[in-house]
Amino acid sequence: MLAPEMPSDSGRPFRSVTRWIFDPGLPRSVGFGCSGPRHQTRPPAARLPRLTRPPLAKIAKARAGVRGHVWGLLRLRPGGFPWLTVAGKRLTGWIVIDLDATVITSASKKAGAAVTFKKTFGFHPLAAWCANTTESLAMLLRPGNAGANTVADHIAVLTDALAQIPGSSAAKILVRVDGAGGHARTARTP
């Protein structure tokens, strides 16, 4: 499809390809409009609308539904559902959730980036993972200066993670959290 657009320079194939890649007229030839000056080779940055709560809730519900189906298929395989072994004891029937924050560095001042507690610059998201399947269950994107032991953040992520566990109201669930999440209010999360 793009073959007619490639320059024919039989002596230097690498040069031909790079000229084709960096040719300012290429975006227009493959259907991209050019609203800026001729020397502008990059299209303007797209602005994505922020996702609000209703679409995020629909996405979370769809993910939980797919996860329920996939976990049902995991139970049917020869090895069954992947149960963990902790301290030499196999936790058959237990779903293990790991809750922890991490630091993600940023080279530029992006929205929400700030100085972290480790004296770097970036973000400090809080995440919940299913240790049985190594899946990400929930994540709260937070600025770099977010507190490590913010109880409200831990409760929000744990609540979202529990909503992702198929049949969580009847499941045996073990939540592992470091000292930052070790608060009585976090432990009482329904």
Image: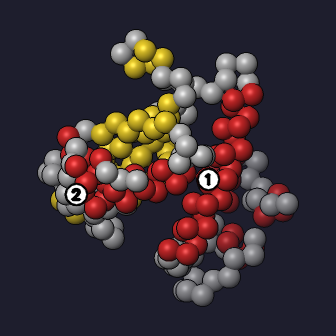
Q: In this view, does 10 lie above or below 49?
A: above
Looking at the rendered structure, which numbered label has been put on residue 139?
Answer: none
Near-viewer residue (123 or 168)? 168
- Where 1 sits versus 179, above or below? below
Q: Residue at (67%, 23%) from the top-left corner?
A: 80
**Can residue 57 be spotted in the picture?**
yes
Determine whether 75 is above or below 100 in the image: above
Q: Depth check: 106 or 5 in front?
A: 106
**Badge 1 element:** helix
User: Left or right: 173 with respect to 166?
Assistant: left
Q: Residues within 10 Å of mark 2 (few under 14, many from 20)?
A: few
Q: Which amino acid does label 2 sit on?
A: Thr
Crowding near the residue tagged with mark 1, few <14, some 14–19, many ≥20 C-alpha atoms within 10 Å? some
Q: Name the residue under label 2.
A: 150
Q: Whole-percent x and y of residue 74?
A: 69, 31
The spot of residue 182 in percent (x, y) is: 22, 44
Q: Which of 119 and 68 is in front in this view?
A: 68
- Element under disc 2: loop
Q: Which residue is drawn at 45% across and 34% down?
A: 96
The amino acid on which the numbered mark 1 sits, given as a three-letter code, is: Ala
- Residue identified by numbered label 1: 64
Q: Do the residues labelled 1 and 2 touch (CB within 8 Å)?
A: no
Question: What is the spatial separation of the Cα atoms under label 1 and label 2, in whole angstroms?
Answer: 26 Å
Q: Which of marks 1 and 2 is nearer the N terminus?
A: 1
Q: How is the image coloured?
A: secondary structure
Left or right of 29, for residue 139? left
The picture places residue 116, in percent across and down from the top left corner, at 19, 55
Percent of width and height locating residue 54: 55, 75
Residue shown at 48%/50% (left/top)? 162
